[in-house]
Image (spheres, rainbow, N blue to C red):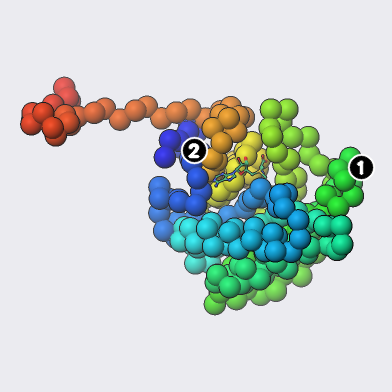
Amino acid sequence: MPRYESRDGRGCLLVGDSRRLDPIPTGSVGVIVTSPPYWMRGRGRRSAEGWARRLAQEFGAEWRRVLAPDGDLWLVIGDRHDGAEWLGLDGIVSEWMRRTGWRLQSKGCWAQVRSRERWDNRLNHVLRFRNAGRAVRPDSTTLCWMLPLPASHRESLWDATPDPVIRTALEKSKKRGPVLDPFIGAGTVALVARAAGRAWIGVERDPRMARLAARRLGLRRPPRPVRTVASGSSGRAPRRTRSG
Ligand SMILES: C[S@@+](CC[C@H](N)C(=O)[O-])C[C@H]1O[C@@H](n2cnc3c(N)ncnc32)[C@H](O)[C@@H]1O
């Protein structure tokens, strides 16, 4: 996967589809904090179920692989009213996550105040999952915020999660290991993680968004590795570099 890196080596942005996280070693991530693209297309429960199933099955398997056994996964997702009823996407997502080996440990919400969004587009669920079989002591903190929608970067195609929500997720989770956002968008989670002194990894499929995140985070492309092996088809011996 193409990548950008921070100069201090504590941040890395992978450009590609986060259904495959091959460059990230198994069990190496301390905490995942992310906001996947919300369920926007389609109507009705069946469509919402399909979206939740794809999230849990197509992305969740790699989240499970890379997350440390005692790590937390935080999902920030929207909800919607389909004209007849609220879909209750927190319940739908939690059920699909449960079927794929996760357990919901805490839930809360952040609601937009002074919002120009449609009335049913202002509520965001904040869901904390762990691997099944790793119980944690129930957390008595109320995870609830009423906040204005943060001013997204003017070039971003997406809204951002407010910093206090991300900061709380990091404070309540395992402190060792990098913070991963597999849908990093304009890089908000990485900015908050960096400010908290954490190493981080981001993944973004859209190269324009990746460039924007790289600019906001001051990242650079790593130098290309020196090619030392000639193509096998010529039958030539590997070319030696001066230092080799
Ligand atoms: C809701 S936005 C995240 C916004 C982010 N929290 C921010 O502060 O900008 C979701 C992001 O996930 C990216 N994305 C969607 N599908 C993806 C995939 N399969 N792999 C990696 N990134 C993906 C989108 O391009 C988008 O930038």
**Pick the front one: 202 or 236:** 236
Q: Residue at x 14, y 34 (%)?
A: 232
**Pick the front one: 205 or 25:** 205
Q: Is residue 192 visible?
A: yes
Number of numbered markers: 2
Name above or below for residue 212 compared with residue 167.
above
Measured as percent of width and height from the top left, residue 59 is found at 53, 56
Which residue does the numbered mark 2 point to in the structure image? 15
Instruction: Tell me the SS state at disc 1.
Output: loop
Name above or below for residue 168 compared with residue 153.
below
Task: Classify the position of the N terminus by image quarter.
Answer: top left
**Residue 196's disc number:** none
Name above or below for residue 41 compared with residue 228.
below
Instruction: Tell me the SS state at disc 2.
Output: strand
Give, as a three-letter code, the residue at label 2.
Val
Q: Earlier in the sequence, mark 2 or mark 1?
A: 2
Gap in angstroms between the C-alphas marked 2 and 1: 34 Å
Which residue does the numbered mark 1 point to in the structure image? 114
Measured as percent of width and height from the top left, residue 8 is found at 48, 34
Q: Residue at x 72, y 45 (%)?
A: 161
Q: Is residue 145 visible?
A: no
**Pick the front one: 205 or 28:** 205
- Tell whether label 1 touches label 2 (CB within 8 Å): no
Q: Residue at x 67, y 68 (%)?
A: 94
Measured as percent of width and height from the top left, residue 13 is found at 51, 38
